[in-house]
Image: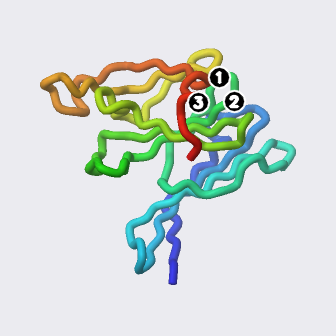
């Protein structure tokens, strides 16, 4: 038997800095409690045009937050506290979920082993650039101290990522 508990509901259209004038996405995070996977977390993501047409309606395998559209409104960016296989779950390591409006798909970016993403803070620049906070693992200062800013062009990054 599976019980789903609603943890958070974020109407993205209320976030002025991340709202797209013709898109009305909503995200809800829930935590599943079942005997097979008692700690699984999922996000229900629905992206609609203001006309009501649904562009995307599905679940992600992680609870995501801090949604932001790129300035050209082609990519929706969200973050999840990282649970990369082979890594200990840490509060300072984040995965970046990217939704392509054109492809209607999600892809995941986790930074690199040398420079992981350490914050869900994001800044956008025209047309599809984002600036994230990372950490250079070669320094003697442990994360999340000694942050660095990393700029990515999402359209180029998208081409390098695998389908999720």
The residue closer to the viewer here, 142 or 16, is 142
Q: Which mark is residue 71?
A: 1
Relative side of 138 to 104, left or right: left
Residue 107, visible in the rendered structure: yes
Residue 16, visible in the rendered structure: no
Q: Secondary structure at mark 1?
A: loop
Where does the image place residue 112, in percent across and percent down from the top left?
Answer: 36, 31
Residues under labels 1 and 2: Cα distance?
8 Å
The residue closer to the viewer here, 80 or 6, is 80
**Residue shown at 69% from the left, 28% from the top:** 73
First reached walking from the N terminus: tag 3 or tag 2:
2
**Residue shown at 62% from the left, 39% from the top:** 99
Callout 3: 10 Å neighbours few (<14), some, many (20+)? some
Residue 124: image quadrant is: top right
Callout 1: 10 Å neighbours few (<14), some, many (20+)? some
Relative side of 23 to 111, left or right: right
Disc 1 to disc 3: CB gap under 8 Å: no
Identify the residue position indicated by label 3 in the image: 158
């Amino acid at each position: 038997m599976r019980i789903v508990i609603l943890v958070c509901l974020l109407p993205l259209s209320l976030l002025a800095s991340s709202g797209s004038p013709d898109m009305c996405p909503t995200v809800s995070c829930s935590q599943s409690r079942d005997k097979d996977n008692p700690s699984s977390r999922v996000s229900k993501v629905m992206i609609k045009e203001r006309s009501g047409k649904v562009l995307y309606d599905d679940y992600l395998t992680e609870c995501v937050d801090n949604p932001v559209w790129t300035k050209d409104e082609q990519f929706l960016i969200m973050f999840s506290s990282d649970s990369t296989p082979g890594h200990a779950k840490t509060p300072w390591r984040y995965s970046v979920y990217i939704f392509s409006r054109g492809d209607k798909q999600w892809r995941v970016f986790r930074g690199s082993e040398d420079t992981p993403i350490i914050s869900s803070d994001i800044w956008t620049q025209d047309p599809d650039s984002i600036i994230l906070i990372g950490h250079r693992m070669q320094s003697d200062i442990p994360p999340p101290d000694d942050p660095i800013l990393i700029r990515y062009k999402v359209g180029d990054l998208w081409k390098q990522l695998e389908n999720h």
